[in-house]
Image (spheres, rainbow, N blue to C red):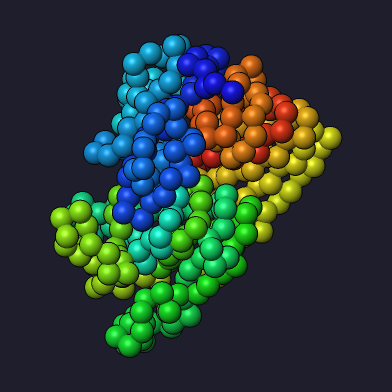
């Protein structure tokens, strides 16, 4: 089905932005309306409004020639907020043809002490598992000293906890948790809007200039949480109806996620704030807007529910209560 250019005024379609990566693959080409040749795309930004990073274009005749950041600044009514704060979230699809780096993100306290650093808590929904059927997340060490000693003897990947990974699995990655998405994974990711990443290792990869990519071992260990959080695979809370099922995946101070699997027709409440509706698979309708896999729509704050139809599998992302 061709991707339409106009969304109903209540739902605002966003245009994804592709980010080439050394470790990326070619599966995300299918989500774009352009020929990317053999370029290895690692990330597809579905929703981003970073002041100094990716700004997702709006793909709607209702709001022509706008970006998500411009809407955030110019139309606070769409978000149910006052002006002044930074956009809180990013939503991505990640295609890992190779293992990603082993990395850690800082929490709020650590970031405040480092000029230019920003906290990042994230979560993952597995669209497709890694080739090994696992993901590396968290650790079993009691303190930084024992972790650093083990790192001097073993590869960082050997020090992280391996969790099983199947399509539909959900993982919570609070700031300070070391992690590594493994080769073969296709992951839907929601995170605080931040580019701060500390790499423990990068598997000997070199950048386009032939130099090894920068590591941040001391910062990464200092930013880590000891012991590692235990709630990294929170159980979903499911509700059923004749139209399908809704799984509440998580609610945190930074974001909330629900997954809806539509059998026929389902009305999905969106809460009192703005939200993003992302289509994981299927073809159907959100209200009167045709949607398909890869589409993400901004649901303005004044829209309190979305009618979904046909065989859609979607994720609804809302900001945390502080936004």
Q: Residue at x 55, y 45 (%)?
A: 256
State which quadrant residue 83 falls in.
Answer: top left
204 to the left or right of 175: left
Image-based side of 187 in relation to 157, left or right: right
Residue 124 higher or lower than 142, as above or below: above
The quadrant the C terminus occupies is top left
Q: Depth check: give the residue in front, 105 or 81.
A: 105
The picture places residue 218, in percent across and down from the top left corner, at 24, 73
Tally of numbered discs = 0
Q: Residue at x 36, y 42 (%)?
A: 38
Going by the picture, which residue comes out furthest to the front?
38
Q: From the viewer's perspective, is residue 63 above or below residue 111?
A: above
* Residue 84 in the image, given as x and y percentages of width and height: 31, 31
- Residue 70 position, x and y percent, is 32, 24
- Does 23 sit left or right of 257 as displayed? left
Q: Residue at x 23, y 62 (%)?
A: 206
Q: Does residue 250 appear in this view?
A: no
List the single residue furthest toward the right. Answer: 242
Q: Position of residue 87 (x, y in %)?
A: 36, 36
Task: Pick whichever, 236 or 295, lies toward us.
Answer: 295
Tell me, yes or no, if residue 128 can be seen here. Answer: yes
Placement of the N terminus among the 4 image quadrants: top right
| Point 34% across, 16% down: residue | 65
Q: Compared to 128, does 84 lie above or below?
A: above
């Amino acid at each position: 089905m061709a991707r339409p250019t106009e969304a109903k005024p209540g739902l605002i379609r966003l245009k994804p932005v592709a980010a080439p990566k050394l470790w990326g693959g070619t599966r995300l080409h299918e989500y774009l309306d352009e020929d990317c040749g053999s370029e290895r795309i690692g990330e597809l930004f579905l929703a981003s409004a970073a002041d100094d990073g990716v700004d997702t274009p709006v793909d709607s005749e209702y709001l022509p020639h706008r970006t998500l950041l411009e809407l955030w600044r110019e139309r606070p009514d769409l978000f149910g907020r006052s002006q002044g704060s930074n956009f809180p979230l990013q939503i991505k699809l990640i295609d890992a043809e190779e293992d990603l780096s082993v990395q850690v993100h800082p929490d709020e306290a650590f970031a405040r002490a480092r000029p230019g650093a920003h906290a990042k808590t994230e979560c993952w929904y597995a669209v497709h598992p890694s080739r090994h059927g696992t993901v590396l997340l968290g650790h079993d060490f009691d303190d930084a000293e024992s972790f650093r000693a083990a790192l001097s003897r073993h590869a960082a990947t050997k020090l992280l906890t391996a969790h099983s990974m199947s399509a539909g699995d959900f993982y919570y990655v609070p700031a300070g948790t070391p992690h590594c998405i493994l080769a073969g994974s296709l992951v839907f990711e929601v995170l605080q809007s931040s580019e701060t990443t500390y790499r423990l290792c990068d598997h000997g990869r070199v950048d386009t200039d032939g130099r090894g990519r920068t590591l941040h071992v001391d910062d990464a260990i200092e930013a880590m949480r000891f012991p590692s959080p235990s709630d990294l695979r929170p159980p979903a809370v499911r509700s059923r109806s004749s139209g399908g099922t809704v799984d509440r995946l998580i609610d945190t101070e930074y974001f909330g996620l629900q997954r809806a699997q539509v059998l026929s027709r389902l009305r999905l409440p969106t809460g009192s704030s703005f939200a993003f509706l992302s289509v994981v698979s299927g073809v159907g309708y959100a209200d009167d807007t045709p949607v398909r896999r890869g589409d993400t729509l901004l649901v303005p704050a004044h829209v309190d529910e979305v009618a979904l139809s046909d065989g859609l599998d979607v994720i609804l992302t809302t900001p945390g209560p502080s936004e």
